[in-house]
Amino acid sequence: MAKIELWLEYASTYSYLTVARIGKLADAKGLAIDWQPFWLYPVREEQRLPMPFPEGSARARYMWTDLERRARELGLPYRRPEVYPFNSMPIGRVALLAAREGWCRPFTEEAFRLHWTQGVLMGTAENLAAALAFAKQDPQRVQALAASVEIKDAFKQQTERALERGIFGSPSFVVDGELFWGDDRLEAAIERALRAA
């Protein structure tokens, strides 16, 4: 089966567009998604990269306009979140546990949907509870495991793994060692994965 690694930062704006459609695209193409949640902050720090969209900058204003435009073009619901940026490390750890246990897709799709269409902010107690319920997971069990030393260490190791792959942003797709960056490269990454298979 064709496979694509999806490297995902849960505070990434353009990642919403990918999360909202990659599952259906993968289903239609017979493609397996290898979910790879990571925290972009230390990756950016290691590479000495600046904030991608500094608050109040022309670039940030463009991003919000472009996100709304792309969502409309793709037929996706969209509601600008009230808070940006935010600390995505805690939800990233939950997502890494989800990826290990095989329920990352429903959890992630619901967490992003709530954040980007309902105003239920990513990683809040309400967002987490709803996304975990959607993924049919016990919140107490998940929170305990996500706070464990094992998951914390594994999440730190994701930084090294991301750097080894040359990743510098989210969403990123790795197919057969080849990197594709950005939601607008999703279709190209899928086609590459199909060819590689």
Image (cartoon, rainbow, N blue to C red):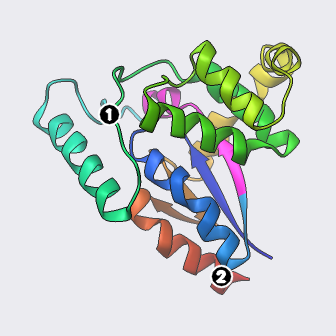
Give, as a single range, the part of the protein colored magenta.
Answer: 34-45
Quadrant location of residue 56? Answer: top left
User: Is 70 in the magenta?
Assistant: no
Q: Residue at x 69, y 21 (%)?
A: 129
Q: Which residue was labeled with disc 1? A: 80
Q: Nearer the viewer, residue 160 or 62?
A: 62
- Residue at 36% in and 20% down: 83
Q: Based on the displayed image, in which of its 4 quarters is residue 169 positioned?
A: top left
**Mark 1 vs 2, N-terminal side:** 1
The x and y percentages for residue 65 are 19, 45
Q: Which residue is mark 2?
A: 194
For the N terminus, give its image quadrant.
bottom right
Q: Left of 161 or right of it: where is 20?
A: left
Q: Position of residue 182 (x, y in %)?
A: 41, 56
Say which residue appears at 80% left-offset and 43% top-offset: 103
Residue 72 against residue 104 in the figure, above or below: below
- 35 drawn magenta: yes
- Please give the name of the residue rendered at 52% of the width and 27% of the height, measured from the top-left corner: 42
**Residue 2 rendering spot, x and y as whole percentages:** 74, 75
